[in-house]
Amino acid sequence: MDKSYVTLAVCPICKGEMNMLLMDRRLRPTFNMHTVVPNEVCDKCKEKYLKDGTMLINPKTGSLVVLKDSAFKRIFEGRTLPKKKIAFCDEEVLEKLQQGGDSYDQ
C-alpha cells in the first residue's frame, strides 16, 4: 500500500483506532494507514489500565508495560506519577519489568 501524508491514530495498548487523524505538515507521504501514538491512549484503555496504573512505553519499539501506580512509586523510589500517566522508557528497563510480577497482563 502506498504511503500518505495522513494517518489514523492507534492506541498503543489495544491497537484500536482513536478517531484522531495525524498529518505530515510538509504534506510528504510518510505514513501508513494506521500509526501508533505512544503518548496517547484510547478512552477504553485509560479507564481499564490507567485508572490505577501508569504505562511505560518505548516509542521506538512500541514495547510497553502498565504498572500499578503503587508499584511505579515503589520501583522508581517515590517519584510522582508522570503527566497523563504515560512515560517513555528504555527497552532494557521494560524487559526487566516484564520479568517481574507487578505489570498487568495484556
Image (spheres, rainbow, N blue to C red):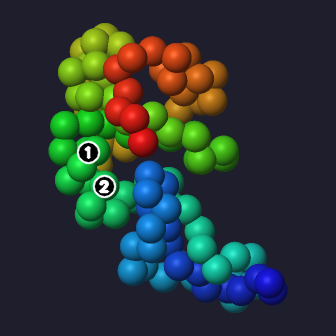
Q: Which residue is mark 1?
A: 50
Judge whether residue 78 can be spotted in this image: yes
Which quarter of the image is occupied by the N terminus? bottom right
78 relative to 20, above or below:
above
Q: Left of 102 or right of it: where is 33?
A: right
- Where is residue 34 drawn, in percent x and y? 60, 74
77 relative to 33, above or below:
above
Which quarter of the image is occupied by the C terminus? top left
Q: Left of 81 or right of it: where is 97?
A: right
Q: Residue furthest front?
A: 105
Q: Which residue is mark 2?
A: 45
Mark 1 and mark 2 in contact (Cβ < 8 Å)? Answer: yes
Badge 1: few (under 14), some or many (20 or more) residues near its Cα, within 10 Å? Answer: many
- Where is residue 84 drawn, in percent x and y? 29, 49
- Badge 1 marks a residue whose secondary structure is helix
Seen from the viewer's position, the closer of residues 89 and 44 is 44
What amino acid type is highlighted by mark number 2? Cys
Q: Which residue corresponds to the image point at 48% horizontal and 55% vertical from the top-left?
A: 12
- Where is residue 46 drawn, in percent x and y? 26, 54
- Where is residue 8 drawn, in percent x and y? 53, 79
Seen from the viewer's position, the closer of residues 11 and 76 is 11
